[in-house]
Amino acid sequence: MEMDYSSDSELSDSDKELQDAFVEGKLKPGLNIVEQAPKKFINNVEGLKHKLEEIKLGLPWIEKLDFVNEEAPLAPELATQLLVHEQKRENQLKNNKKLPQFKPSDDPVLNDFNREMSFLRQAQAAILDAIPKLKALGISTKRPDDYFAEMAKTDEHMQKIRERLMQKQQQQQRSERVKQLRQQRKEGKLLQVQTKLQRQQEKKEMLDQVKKYRKGVSKDLDFLDSKKSKAISRKALEKRKLKNKKFGFGGKKKGGKLNTKESAADISEYRSPKGPRKGRDSKGNKGKGKAKTRPGKNRRVKARNKK
């Protein structure tokens, strides 16, 4: 009990010291926050209307171009987009277990889509009302062909924007190409598996037919020619031609130039008493005869002078 009284007295002394320091101005600003009562705002409707009348300029409609209208009717393509978006968001929310289960009407993303759709429809309705009014006032609504307006942004800035857009487009094309390659690989693997299973099935059927023929159950061998005579692809034929050209058709390769009994007995190419062999001169040399030599320079000069 004595300790409690001493602690209370200490707290009161410290509060008194702080109050005295605050009165004397010794406390620095920022260390203490003086709370103020919240301000009360009065909804003065008459005063607001009066102020509105004061700041009103009373300009004609052509200077303001303001419209207050209802939304335009929902177009079929917009209704289709809205339905597709609702279904997509509903499926995403159902599949995602971490997020709470929203209804399509309570989905904030879908509400943003509906809000943008409302802006679009209201703008369409304003255009339908504004175009006839502008034509009645004799104001053109289309830009002339020779109209020139200087751009607000510099060419360097627009060039950066173009480069950025090109980069995004290239990234999208690259990602699409990667997706296509992955899909093609998946399809190729599926085709390989299907082909392998089909070959295994055909092999099994062939073996079953062979077993039946061996046991005497079946005496028909047409199964060897029916399924087996498949059309050979063009690529396989070209490959076969190249291999035949390179390696031949098999058979013995060595000893092709050795003499045989028939080649040894053949003496038709040797000299006969009737004359030299065909393609040789009288001395037995190869060639069509004596080669013609070019005359010397003196002979050529004399022949030229005679002419």
Image: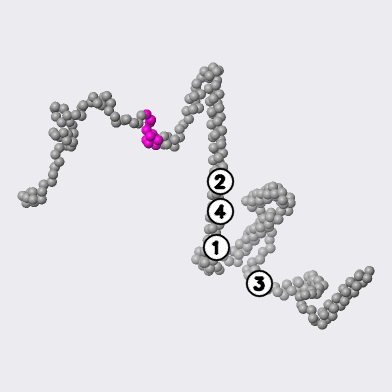
Rendered residue at 66%/53% (across/down): 74
Task: Choose between 247 and 199: the one closer to the eye.
Answer: 247
Is residue 61 positioned above or below 267 on the image?
A: below
Amino acid identity at mark 3: Leu
Secondary structure of residue under mark 1: helix
Is residue 268 positioned above or below 296 on the image?
A: above
Rendered residue at 54%/34% (across/down): 196
Q: Using the rendered image of the protein, determine whether residue 221 is visible from the camera's viewpoint.
A: yes
> Left of 297 or right of it: where is 156?
right
Q: Which residue is mark 2?
A: 182
Give the residue furthest to the right. Answer: 1
The magenta region covers 241-251
Q: Using the rendered image of the protein, determine whether residue 102 is visible from the camera's viewpoint.
A: no
Q: Which residue is mark 1?
A: 161
Q: Decide: few, some or many residues near mark 4? Use Cα within 10 Å; few <14, some 14-19, many ≥20.
A: few
Secondary structure of residue under mark 4: helix
Amino acid identity at mark 4: Gln
User: Looking at the image, is mark 4 or mark 1 earlier in the sequence?
Assistant: 1
Rendered residue at 55%/55% (across/down): 171
State yes or no: discs 4 and 2 in contact (Cβ < 8 Å). Answer: no
Q: Position of residue 10 (x, y in %)?
A: 88, 74
**Cα gap from disc 3 to disc 4, whole angstroms:** 50 Å
Give the residue furthest to the left. Answer: 306
Q: Position of residue 131 (x, y in %)?
A: 61, 62
> Which numbered circle lies on residue 59?
3
Amino acid identity at mark 2: Arg
Is residue 139 positioned above or below 281 on the image?
A: below
User: Looking at the image, is mark 1 or mark 3 earlier in the sequence?
Assistant: 3
Rendered residue at 69%/59% (across/down): 70
Q: Quadrant of residue 69?
A: bottom right
> Left of 99 or right of it: where is 174?
left
